[in-house]
Image: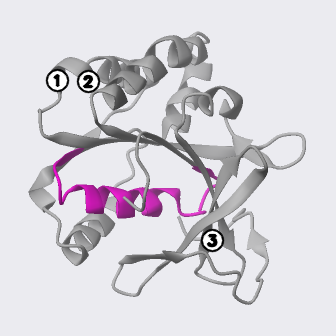
Amino acid sequence: MFGLNGLIHLSGVAGSGKTLFAVALASKATRSGKVLWINTDAKTAFVNHLKVNIDSVGGDRIAISILPIMGHKRVREAILNLPGSLDEDTVLIVVDPVTRALDMSHREDVMWGREMFEEVMPTLAGLIARGLNVIIVSESRSFDREPVAVFHRSIKGWADHDLVLSRRYGTSVTDVTRYQTEGKVPFVQFTLAEEGVVKVTEYNEGDNSEVSDCSGSRCSA
C-alpha cells in the first residue's frame, strides 16, 4: 500500500480527500486479503469509488465488507470485539472517520476520549501485532495556529504513519505529507480522474499552487 503498513493515521480538513486516499489504500489491499471498513458517519458516496478503484487495480470487490455504525458507544464496542471476530485472512481495517465518534461523545459520554486511548487504540495496536494494517481517519479542526486532528497529540503516539492531506486551491491535486521529527515532509500526491479512479503519484510541487483549507463549499467531499 504505497509503502505504508502498521497504523496509518490520515487527517485533514473537510474535503481534503482523506476518504479518497483511504479508498486507494483499501482497494490495493483487496488484492491480498479481506478488508473491513467501519463507517461511522452514514455517508455512502465512497462506496462507488471503492468499486471503481478496486476494479482499476485488479482487486476483489467481494473481499471488502462495510460496517456502518452510528454512536461512539457502538463504535467502541465494535472495535473492542475485532480481535475475536475478524476472518483470518483480513489484512486491513479502516475506521472512517474516528472524529465523528469523538464528536458524538461530547453529547453522550465525556469519557469517550479516555476510552479512545485506554481501550480503542491499544486494541487496534494489538491487531497490528497480528500482522494487520489499520487506517484511522480524522478531521482536522482549527485551534491556535493551523488545523490539526482532534486528539492528534495522543494519536500520533500510536501511529506508524501520520499523514496530513491538503487540497491545492483551484486544482484537483491533493498533497499528502508525513509528520516527522523535522516537520511535515512531502510523501505523495493524488488526483481523482473523471472515471473516479484515485491516481497516486510521487510528490511534485508543480506550479506551486496554493494549498486550500477546503473550507466552505470550495472543495468537494
| Residue at screen point 61% across, 75% down | 203
10 inside magenta stretch: no
Q: CA distance from mark 2 to mark 3?
A: 34 Å
Q: In the image, which residues are magenta?
A: 11-35
Q: Position of residue 18 (x, y in %)?
A: 52, 57
Mark 1 = which residue? Answer: 85
Quadrant of the frame with the N terminus: bottom left
Q: Please report the residue visible at 74 percent of the width from the left and 90 percent of the height from the top.
A: 207
Residue type at mark 3 is Cys
5 or 105, which lies in front? 5
Give the quadrant of residue 15: bottom right
According to the picture, the residue beneath numbered tag 3 turns out to be: 219
Mark sitting earlier along the chain (2/3)? 2
Q: Say which amino acid is labelled 1.
A: Ser
Q: Secondary structure at mark 1?
A: helix
Residue 198, given in percent of the width and then of the height, sits at 40, 74
CA distance for labels 2 and 1? 5 Å
Q: Is residue 69 visible?
A: yes
Q: Kindly check if marks 2 and 1 are in contact, taking CB atoms under 8 A apart as contact.
A: yes
Are circles 2 and 3 on residues that touch, CB within 8 Å? no
Query: In this orientation, which residue lies closer to the viewer: 83 or 195?
Result: 83
